[in-house]
Image (cartoon, helix red, strand yellow):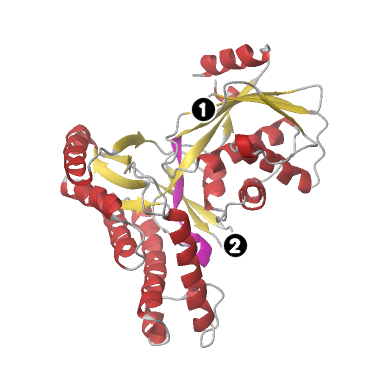
Amino acid sequence: MIDHLHQAFNTYFNRTDGKAFFSPSRVNLIGEHIDYNGGFVFPCALSYGTYGVAQLRDDDLVHIFSASFSNSVYSFSLHDLKKDANHAWVDYIKGSIEALQKEGFIFHKGIDLYIEGDMPLGAGLSSSASLEMLVIYIFNTFYHLNLSKEKMAQLGQYAENKFVGVNSGIMDQFAVIAGKKDHAILLNTDTLAYELIPIKLQHEKLIIANTNKRRGLAESKYNERFSECQEALSIIKKTKNITHLCELNLDDLNDVKDALSPVVYRRVKHVVSEQQRTILSTKSLKQGDITHFAKLMTSSHESLRDDYEVTGIELDTLQEELIKAGALGARMTGAGFGGCVVAIIPDHDVETLKDIVIHNYEKKIGYKPTFYEVKITDGTQELNALW
C-alpha cells in the first residue's frame, strides 16, 4: 500500500519526497445519542480509513488529488478558503486549515496532498472526521505545532460545525485521533477526560454490517431527538440541580416521570439507561468478559428501538438476523434510520453467519446488506515512521 501511495503522489505532483499518513474511521460500540447529553461514549478507531501523502510547497497553494472525489488536481490558496458548492468534499480540508489559522497559526507554505480512502462511504463510519484529522495531523507534523490530541479533535469539530455547517459532537474526531490498537475510548463528552479500555477478542470478531439504506431521515430525526432532550432538561432542571441529562441515574427516572410527556420520558429513559450500559460495558471489558459486553450491546439496540425510536425496519431486521444467526451481541450505531449495525460474532462462524443473514435480510428487505470485518487500530499517524 505504501508503495502505491508514493507512486500515486509522484504521478499527480511529479515529486518523490512525500510523507505517508493514515487516518482511521471509527465506530461507536455503545453509548448512542449520548454525546449531546453530556455523558460517556465508547468509540474505537477502525482499520478502514483515509490515506494521504503530502509535502510542503514553496508557495501558498494547496493542491489536492482525491482518488474518491476528483478527476484532476484541485487547487486553492491558504488565504482564500471559500466554500465550494461544486466540490463539497474540499470544504472539510479548507475548514480544517481555517480552524488552525483561527488558533493563531500562520502558514506561508501550502502542500501537495494525494488522498485515497478505503472506507465505505455513507455507512456512518465518519469519513469526514477521518479527513479532518488527516489534514490537521499533516499540518501539525510539517509545521511542528505540538498540538495535543484533544486540541486536534476540537479543531476538527470546528471544521465540521462552523465551516461545513454540520452539527455534531466531538466523539468522531476524538475517536479518530486518539484511537489505540485493541482498545476503545471511554470518553466523557462534557470534560473530554478519557480512558483507554482494552478489548481482547480472542475467539470473536468485530464486524460492521451496512443496511445499505439511504439515511434520508437521520438528520431531521437527530434534530428532533436533540430538541426532545433539551425540552426534558429544561423541565427537570426546575426540580433537580443538573446541567446534562446524563447526570441523572436510574433511580431518578421515577422522580421525573410525571413531569414529562410519555414520549419525552422514553427519550430520557434511553439516555439514562444507555449511560448505565456504557459504564457497565467498560467494567465487563476490564474483566475480560466479552459475552456480557455483547449482551449490553444488544440491550442498547433494544433501547434505541423502543425508547429512542431511531432504528427502523432495516436496522431492526439486520440486528435481529445477526442475533438469530449466532452473534454474541449486535446494535445499530450512528444516528439511525439506516447506516450500520456493529456486532461481535464467534470467529469460527463468520462466513456461515454472513450467508444466513444476507439471505434472510434480502428476503425481507429486498436487497442485500454489506459486511466488513474490521480491526481496532491506532489513531491518525504517519506511516513512514512504521516502515
* Between 320 and 349, the one nearer to me in the picture: 320
- Residue 329 visible to the viewer: no
Q: Residues within 10 Å of mark 1 (few under 14, many from 20)?
A: few
Q: Residue at x 29, y 66 (%)?
A: 306
Amino acid, disc 2:
Thr
Q: Residues within 10 Å of mark 2 (few under 14, many from 20)?
A: few
Say whether residue 345 is magenta: no
Quarter containing the C terminus: top right
* Circle 2/circle 1 CB separation < 8 Å: no
Instruction: Give the residue at mark 2.
Output: 191
| Magenta highlight range | 35-47
Asked if residue 290 lies left or right of residue 184, the reply is left
In this rendering, the answer to whether 61 lies above or below 286 is: above
In this rendering, the answer to whether 131 lies above or below 284 is: above
Instruction: Give the residue at mark 1.
Output: 68
Q: Secondary structure at mark 1?
A: loop
Q: Residue at x 71, y 39 (%)?
A: 97
Asked if residue 335 lies left or right of residue 72, the reply is left
Kindly report the distance in space between the C-alpha atoms of the residues bearing marks 2 and 1: 36 Å
Asked if residue 149 lies left or right of residue 23, the reply is right
